[in-house]
Amino acid sequence: MEKNLLADKMFQLVMKRKYTCFFNYMAEGNEIFINGNFEKEILFSDSCDPIRAMLASDNVSDGGKPALSEYYSRFRGMLGTPAESDYLEILIHIRFEKGGEFIPVCIALNSECSDDGILVGYSGYIVSIAGAAKQIQKNASTVNNKAPFSVPDAMRIINSSEKAAVIQFDIRNFKNINQTYGEETGDRILDYIAANLKDVWGREAVTCRLGADIFNIFTAYDNEEELELRMGLVADKLQQYKNITYKFYFGVYFVTDKSLPLRKMTDLAALARKNGRDNVFNSVNYYTEQFANMIKNRHDIENEMEKALETGQFKVYLQPKVRIADGKIVGAEALVRWIHPEKGVIPPNEFIPVFEKNGFIQKLDEYMHRQVCALIRKWIDMGLDPVPISANVSQVYLNTNLPEKIQEIINEYDIPIDLFQIEITETYENRQVEICIDEFKKRGFTLLMDDFGSGYSSLNTLSNTRFDVIKLDRGFLGSYLLNERCKKIVSHTIAMANDIGLGLVAEGVETQEQAVFLDDSGCKCAQGFLYSRPVPVSDFEKMVYGIRVTV
C-alpha cells in the first residue's frame, strides 16, 4: 500500500498540536495512537472501528457527522471490492474531555487499497487546528497526493451534456521515477500535471488529481475521435517534466447511465485504466461490460477458493505421454481441474492467473503434489507398475525452500523420486530460479522445461540448461511445420537436443502427420489430443492398466 496519512512529514506536523491522534482500521483490527492529551475512550471504543465509534459519540458535534457518515457509508459499501482510495477532510468540533468545551479540529480520512486495487481499510488523523488549518490542508494535499474537486461541477457537466465521459489516467511505473529521481521530484511532476491539466484539455471540464499518480477528467465530448485527440494532446504536452519523460495510461468510461453515483463512474474508468496497463502498444483503454464480468468472476473465485480446496473440488487430471513408435503410455502430466458443484468445470485459465496473483497458487501446488504422490503410492501398494508423473510448479512459487518441501512430501508417501517429475516453464535468467533448479538437481529430481519455444528460447538455452527433458511447445510446432525451411529448424533443434543428451517431449500433437514428422526427426515421445485429452485418474488407469482401480 502506498504511503499516505501516516507519512513522516504529516506525523511531525500534527504531533505538535495539543490534541492529536492517528487511527487505522483494517480487516484484522484497529490501531489507534494518541499523543497523551486525552483518553481513547472519549472518542473510540474497542468494540467497533474508529469512525463508527465517533459517529456514536456525544463528543463529536452534530454538524460534522453527516459528512463523516457519508464517507463511512461509501467505505462500508465498497469494502472488499475494487475501488480507488477515497479521501475526506472536514473541519468540525470535538470535545476531548467529558463536559468540556468543543474544540475545532481537522479530521482527515483516507481509505486504503491493496496492491490489486481491493478496498481493505482506512486510516486517518484528528488534530486541533487553531491557527494551523491552512498549513495542515496544504501538507495533507502534498503528502497524500490528493486534490479536491467539485462533485456538483462534475455532475453538472455530465448531466447537461448530450455526451459525457469520465477519464482516468496514471503514470506507468511511477514508482521508478520516485526511486530514480527521488520523491520530491516525483511530487513536482504530479504538481506540474495537476496545475496544467485543465488548460491543456482545452474545453470545459473538471480535472483533478485523485490520489497518488492518478488523475481524473470529467468532460463533455462531441465524438470519440475528439476525446482521443484531446488525450493525445495531454500526452504530448504533459508526458515530460524538464528532462524526465514518462508514459500515461488512460481509462475511459462513456457515461451511459447518468443516474450512477459519480464515484461509480470513476470506478468504471479506473477498471478500464487498470485493464490496459499490460498493453504497451495502446495507452487508451475503454470500459466495457466485460471488465465488470472479469472483476466479478475474480471475486467469486477468491471467495470460493478456500472452500474448494477443503472440499476436494480441485481434481487431478492426467494427460498421457506416449511413445510415438507404438503408442505406449510412458508417463503423464498432472493438470488441475476445478469441478464446481454448481458451475461445473471452471477452466484453469480463469482461476490460475488469479491464484498466481493472490498467492493461493502455493496452496494449490502443494495440494496437487500431495495428490500425485498419494496416487503413485496407491499404484505401488496395488502391485502395479507406475509410470512417472510430472507436476507443474508455478513461477511465483519457485524459491530455495521449495525443493525441500517437495522432498518432504515424497518422503512422507515413500515413493521413488524418479516417479515424481518437476515441470518448470522456461524463463529469463533469474538467480533465485537457478538456485532452486540446482537444489532440485542435487536431490535427484528429473526436471522438465515446459513450453520450450514459446518465449525465451535460444540455442544458448540448450547448451547451458540444467533440465533433463525439453518439452516442445505446441506453438513452436504449429508455426514451424508450415514449410520445408521451418521443418528443418525443428529437425535441427531436435537433433541438437539429442546430441547433448536431453530428453524430448512434443506437446500439442494433434495430427498423425505431426507425429510421423517428429518421430522421423528424433523426438520419440509426445502428448496431445491425437492421443488423449487430460482425463480423470480413473480413465487414465483404465488406459494404462486396462482396469478401473480408483476407489
Image (spheres, rainbow, N blue to C red):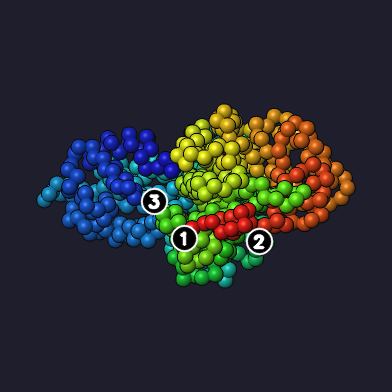
Judged by depth in the image, the label closer to the viewer, 1 or 2, is 1
Q: Nearer the viewer, residue 395 or 22?
A: 395
Q: Residue 22 sits in which quadrant? A: top left
Residue 87 in view (yes/no): yes
Q: Give left or right: position of 63 versus 350.
A: left
Q: How many marks?
A: 3
Residue 419: x and y in percent read 58, 41
Residue 193: x and y in percent read 55, 45
The extreme right residue here reads 484
Query: Gap in Å between the C-alphas at discs 2 and 3?
Result: 37 Å
Query: Gap in Å between the C-alphas at discs 3 and 1?
Result: 17 Å
Query: Gap in Å between the C-alphas at discs 1 and 2?
Result: 38 Å
Residue 120 is labelled as 3
| Residue denoted by label 1 | 300
Label 1 element class = helix
Write the residue at 57% across / 48% down: 384
The extreme front residue here reads 383
Residue 194: x and y in percent read 52, 47
Quarter of the rendering occupied by the N terminus: top left
Q: Amino acid at mark 2?
A: Glu
Label 3 element class = strand
Q: Amino acid at mark 1?
A: Asp
Write the residue at 54% across / 41% down: 396
